[in-house]
Amino acid sequence: MQLQFAIDTLSTDAALELAAAAAPHVDILELGTPLIKSEGVAAIRALRAAHPDKTLLADLKTADAGELEADLAFGAGADLVTVLGTADDSTIAGAVKAAGKHGKGVVVDLIGVADKAERARQAAELGAVFSEFHAGLDEQAQDGYSLDTLLSAGSASGTDFSVAGGVSVATIAAVQAAGARVAVAGGAIYGAPDVAAAAAELKAAIA
Ligand SMILES: O=C([C@H](O)CO)[C@H](O)[C@H](O)COP(=O)(O)O
């Protein structure tokens, strides 16, 4: 299983600092949605320049104009982009078309999707490389939130999937046991006092 670091910061400088510390211990560097909204695709160019050989995921969470938005991010150096599972099939298909042009890939983010397993199967048919079983920061803050629901749905989907929703050192082994292709961790890394050590600890837990 791969480890993806969601860099949910607001400035490119902060993202570069976090990425430099965590990169040796993670497989995928994710430019978080807040970062891309704050800094634009210039942040993708900066991370690409600093990490020429690392897999970069731009968490665009595209809802419309899939081909246009994906093309922008791939052109700036992203290897993977996210499109919302709640978007129209044609939006996902458009992003997949752009991915084909650049030799890159699309991840479908299932945040807010009721039947995540079924939508993941549809996303695979539309050409997504995998789907992200995701509970966002707002859902995580609600009473009774549990990662287990995401893990069961991911396993039941029969697709390649990632999991995001407050993954931590306490839960990452369960993510791996559920059969995920990628575990996504944001706050557990960028919120730690020692970012490099936190990333290394997560990686060691799934080695
Ligand atoms: O995608 C995310 C969220 O919607 C904010 O943009 C996070 O990157 C994702 O949830 C992973 O972060 P943690 O939940 O803090 O691990």
Image: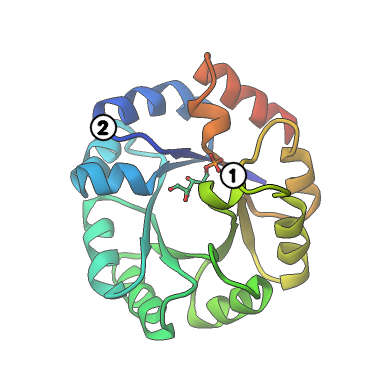
Q: Secondary structure at mark 1?
A: loop
Q: Residue furthest top?
A: 193
Residue at (52, 49) in percent of width and height? 138
Q: Position of residue 180 (x, y in %)?
A: 69, 54
Q: Quadrant of the C terminus?
A: top right
Of callouts 2 and 1, the N-terminal one: 2
State which quadrant residue 54 falls in: top left
Question: What amino acid does circle 2 point to?
Answer: Ser
Residue at (64, 40) in percent of width and height? 167
Toward the viewer: 84 or 24? Answer: 84
Query: Tag 1: Cα neighbours inside 10 Å, few (<14), some, or many (≥20)?
Result: few
**Mark 2 CB in 8 Å range of ligand 1?**
no
Toward the viewer: 180 or 134? Answer: 134
Toward the viewer: 161 or 54? Answer: 161
Q: Is residue 207 visible?
A: no
Q: Residue furthest front?
A: 143
Which residue, given by chain and number where applicable, does mark 2 sit on? 11
Which residue, given by chain and number where applicable, does mark 1 sit on? 141
Toward the viewer: 50 or 151? Answer: 151
Q: Position of residue 144 (x, y in %)?
A: 73, 49
State which quadrant residue 64 falls in: bottom left
Residue at (70, 49) in percent of width and height? 145
Disc assigned to residue 159? none
Number of numbered callouts drawn: 2
Indicate which label's residue lies in the foreground, 2 or 1.
Answer: 1
Q: Is residue 63 above or below residue 167?
A: below
Q: Secondary structure at mark 2?
A: loop
State which quadrant residue 166 falls in: top right
